[in-house]
Amino acid sequence: MKDLAKRFTENPLLMPKDLVASRNELQIISLLNPGVFRFQGKTWLLIRVAESIAQKEGVIFFPILNAMGQMEIIEVPLNDPDLIATDARIVNYKGLDYLTTVSHLRLLVTEDGIHFSEPESFDTSLFGRGELERYGIEDCRVSQIGDAYYLTYTAVSDSGVGVGLRITRDWRHFEFKGMILPPHNKDVAIFEEKINGKYYALHRPSSKDIGGNYIWLSESPDGLHWGNHKCLVKSRPGSWDSARVGAGAAPIRTPIRTPIGWLEIYHGANAAHQYCLGAFLMDLEDPAVVIARTTEPIMKPLENYELSGFFGYVVFTNGHVVDGDRLTVYYGAADEFVCGAYFSITEILAAMGFSPSS
Ligand code: MAN
């Protein structure tokens, strides 16, 4: 069965061997989940680079950043009875969770939307900083509000998974705003326009007990302090998004000529950790009102590079570019590659029951 995505024939656009690791002794395991923005007339990606050291047989390593921001490696024999290593992404050792890789963010630029390179005159790597980012920083959304770029990313440490914020105007200097939403939370997409004088953001708190992995909306007077939280979109039992849902990039005011709402592309997964994309539409004046949501995925893993990799059967997006009806989505495939696909916004709206004249 097909989906609504028109994948780039050049996919995968980026794979681990295309970039150089941040340190000699490290190797890049995955390139994935890019934030996307326009700057100086070009399209830029802020991709997640997941690194570890070369694996040896019979031993597992998991890297963490020490207080100086340098990587330290913990090494454990695979047959250690205190080790639970059933997921390629996370291990549990002596009752504590660790990631198998540490991620940083890397800046890339493109002229044609397809070929990317690290811009020479920029410091292209952003690393985790401080105690709450010891396991790395991941999956950054970039929202442009005026001339400011808001970077909201997953900050991981032994204290949990929360959301960090850095703000830049020139991609050379960054204001470090610390953790804006505490654990467990991720997938924060700030709206790129204020609504009735307030900032809005989608986010994804989760509870291990009552509740689930749902998309929430919150508002803020200043883009830093968030409140009036409302639960917006839930996982659906029996569906492709039965286990978790999370926002992609900033909502799109759409269609451009006659706005009917805020369109959000989101990811959903089932209990088997199979990730697809869907969409929902929020009211233009009051985004707490969800007008419509797609039933079937608008994109699902179909190509080899989506079905197998570091963690197979995954398409995940947190970055796109809008040009009229054309939505260019950049996405992580199989948690290992960066890929691109075009969508028609009209077709996504049609999948929710809106025709161009309705
Ligand atoms: C999940 C996955 C991983 C990620 C961790 C921490 O397990 O999304 O890729 O590293 O959460 O954010």
Image (cartoon, rainbow, N blue to C red):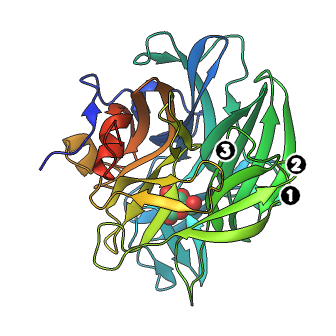
Q: Write down the residue under mark 1.
A: 225
C-alpha gap between disc 2 and disc 3: 13 Å
As rendered, which of 327 and 65 lies closer to the eye?
A: 327
Please indicate whether residue 89 sits to the left or right of residue 70 in the image.
left
C-alpha gap between disc 1 and disc 3: 14 Å
Say which of marks 1 and 3 sits in front: 3
Q: Residue at x 42, y 58 (%)?
A: 292
**Rendering coords of residue 300 (x, y %):** 27, 51
Q: Quadrant of residue 304?
A: top left
As rendered, which of 139 and 200 lies closer to the eye?
A: 200
Please indicate whether residue 196 sits to the left or right of residue 142 in the image.
right
Quarter of the image with the C terminus in it: top left
Name the kind of residue labelled 1 in the image: His
Please tell me whether residue 77 is drawn above or below residue 27 in the rendered image.
Answer: below
Please tell me whether residue 118 is drawn above or below residue 89 in the rendered image.
Answer: above
Q: Secondary structure at mark 1?
A: loop
Q: Residues within 10 Å of mark 1 (few under 14, many from 20)?
A: few
**Rendering coords of residue 223 (x, y %):** 82, 48
Q: Residues within 10 Å of mark 2 (few under 14, many from 20)?
A: few
Can residue 100 be seen here? The reply is no
Please tell me whether residue 203 is drawn above or below residue 298 in the rendered image.
Answer: below
Can residue 237 be seen here? The reply is yes
Instruction: Work out whether mark 2 precedes mark 3 in sequence or the reverse, and give the earlier one.
Output: 3
Q: Write down the residue under mark 3.
A: 191
Q: Secondary structure at mark 3?
A: loop
Q: Residue at x 72, y 17 (%)?
A: 122
Q: Write down the residue under mark 2.
A: 222
Instruction: Work out whether mark 1 precedes mark 3 in sequence or the reverse, and give the earlier one.
Output: 3
